[in-house]
Amino acid sequence: MSKLNRRKFLSLTGGALATTLLGFPMLSMASKKRVVIVGGGIGGATAAKYLRMMDSSINVTLIEPNSNYFTCFMSNEVLGGGRNLDSLKFNYAGLKKHGVEVVHDLVTGIDPVAKKVSIKSGKSMPYDACIVSPGVDFIWEAIEGHSAAVAETVPHAWKAGAQTATLKKQIMGMRDGGTLVIVSPPNPFRCPPGPYERASQIAWYLKNNKPKSKIIILDNKPAFSKMGLFTAGWEKYYGYNSANSMIEWVSGDAGGTVASLDAKNMTVATDVADFKADVLNIIPAQKAGKIAFTAGLVNESGWCPVNQRTFESSKHKDIYVIGDSSVASPLPKSGYSANSEAKVCAAAIAASLNGKESPEPSLVNTCYSIIMPDDAISVAMVYRMGPDGKIIKVAGSGGLTPADASEEMRKREVGYAHSWFNNITDDVFG
Amino acid sequence: MLQKKIIESCLLLVLSMASGAAIAATPGASMLANTCAGCHGTNGVSSGPAAPTIAGFSNDYFIGVMQQFKNAEIPSTIMTRIAKGYTDEEIKLMAKHFSEMEFKRKPQQFDAKKAAFGKRLHNKYCEKCHENGGRKSEDDAGILAGQWAPYLNNAMNDYTSGDREMHKKMKKKVDALQKDHGDAGLDALINFYASQK
Ligand SMILES: Cc1cc2nc3c(=O)[nH]c(=O)nc-3n(C[C@H](O)[C@H](O)[C@H](O)COP(=O)(O)OP(=O)(O)OC[C@H]3O[C@@H](n4cnc5c(N)ncnc54)[C@H](O)[C@@H]3O)c2cc1C
């Protein structure tokens, strides 16, 4: 189709067409537009790839300090012994093949007026649109005695890589009969089922290697994600609710809220009791990534409010926030959500840069949890726009693995969970 | 070609917007399809080991299977929960979208001896409907060649256990296959499909 024809066609058919046009590359007519992406994790890398797939005339620069990315997802399986850390490692070669310019540096500021991103090495980069996906930062001061320095030896392992390796080493080194304490963070936090999948995976390792050991989960919450399925699984495999249960969960009501840490003595104190640990895994309370604060993108909640149709920041025009840092609820803070949000955001930006209206969004979240090597559970949901511009759950869709699912179906979920890992990482980095 | 595609999808879009107007606007085909990629791979091509590739299916097969998921008529671990999130209109949009994507075959492990035996069995019992060695999806029969073996294994287990209803004539052939060759026959067939590049 010639340019003239296309234009005529567009004007004849109106804005609604933008949605379908986005599926086809090379349709942009404007001069080169620049999109700068802050953070090459799940949200940022997906947005970079899909922007290029949607409109290859857009110049996409991704800024990420690390040359490798370790996924958090499946890192609990590393702790359980089911895979090695290297299998979580990805790089940016795939994105480069899509024509994404990858710059390994740290973003130090975003100027929403001059529309420039500045990086540690001193350069500044102009943008027409900027996507921010920096993940989470930790609120160390929520627990007295805790700090980033202490976390070198009391690992959180809530960002994967070196932290995962440290925790794994400590678990391997623990004596049979030792106590491992997991401190679960307050809501909202990245990967709501994550701490409980972690307890399951570590329990699997201990059951097979150090069966006299114990896991205590200290929680400030009265309940947690997939609770019924997790506790039923723990009953089945780890003696939960029996006299010699391997896992003990202390809810907020029962005194699970941790107030302080004595790192030297490996002890955490709640309002009710002190808990001494052989291995201590504190997952701190969370807030938006640091750069979101520097750039003035957060509100009083510590997270970034956005227009949920486009993920454009409610604070600054032409800056978009996706992934864990954004307020995307009802979507949880998960990798699947970040991947899904990134595509909606990329489509909105590609439309806007071509002078079109943002397309109607559709989103999905899924989260698999592997309780032991033959048994996995999942939660899923389909989302769309509600009448008031907020994302809503599609009624009747989604939900948990049915409580009465057969062993065969639960085993299938393990294979599908591993497939999900392969497919989402390929969708993000491939 | 491009023009034709655009006009077609535009018509579809306008139609779907007209019918769905009371609820909300219908997202476009690629917007909808992008939500599946986390589990089925970019453009519907799965990296395995178990989740099926969903690219290249015929419209009929895709719509049929999605509707069956939606109504919980075939056993599924998760697809019933997913399919219930989409209107009939949206399923049609996705069917067309994925039918235009290429079913790419990724290498998987197989036993060469079993695969050779499976090829003979396929020609005898299955080729009539799953033409061209199970590569074709022109009517409503799906794609078997190069599909992930654990998925096909699950599907065959669901059929033979009676949890997934079989096409009457397919049942006759599968019954005959089982009578003549037992589980080894099915295993050989799955190895044959896994061997297809
Ligand atoms: C143990 C565990 C298990 C999990 N399991 C699952 C699961 O099964 N399923 C699921 O869907 N999700 C899971 N998650 C959640 C998932 O990992 C996150 O939700 C997801 O990574 C969020 O993506 P993001 O882009 O917001 O942040 P990230 O993926 O963390 O990416 C942020 C990136 O930004 C970079 N960055 C930060 N600041 C700057 C800056 N100033 N300049 C440049 N770059 C910067 C960082 O280096 C990082 O690479 C799990 C998480 C954990 C901890």
Image (cartoon, grey):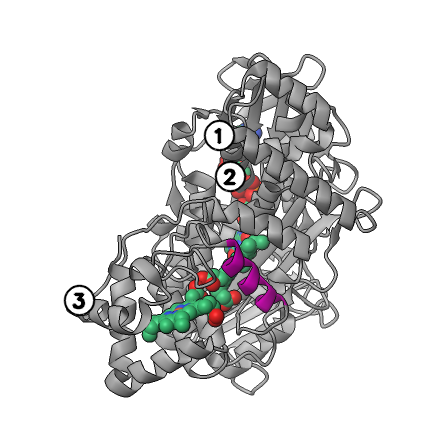
Chain letter of disc 2 in the image? A
x, y percent for residue B74: 54, 73
Residue contact at pointers 2 and 1, CB within 8 angstroms: yes
Q: Is mark 1 within 8 Å of ligand 1?
A: yes
Residue A128 appears in the rendering: no
Query: How far apart are the two marked residues, 3 and 1, measured between alpha carbons?
Result: 49 Å
> Mark 2 Cα within 10 Å, few/some/many (few <14, many 20+)?
many
What's drawn in magenta, residue-wise? B59-70
Name the residue type under label 2.
Gly
Q: Label 3: which residue?
A: B116
Name the residue type under label 1.
Glu
With A313 as the anchor, is B151 left or right in this view? left
Chain letter of disc 3 in the image? B
**Closest to the observer, B168 or A208:** B168
Q: Residue at x 59, y 39 (%)?
A: A343
**Closest to the observer, B48 or B72:** B72
Q: Label 2: which residue?
A: A41
Residue B37 appears in the rendering: yes
Mark earlier in primary sequence (2, 1): 2
Name the residue type under label 3.
Ala
**Closest to the observer, A7 or A218:** A7
x, y percent for residue A45: 50, 36
Q: Is mark 2 within 8 Å of ligand 1?
A: yes
Query: How far apart are the two marked residues, 2 and 1, measured between alpha carbons?
Result: 8 Å
Q: Which mark is residue A64?
A: 1
Q: Residue at x 70, y 35 (%)?
A: A310
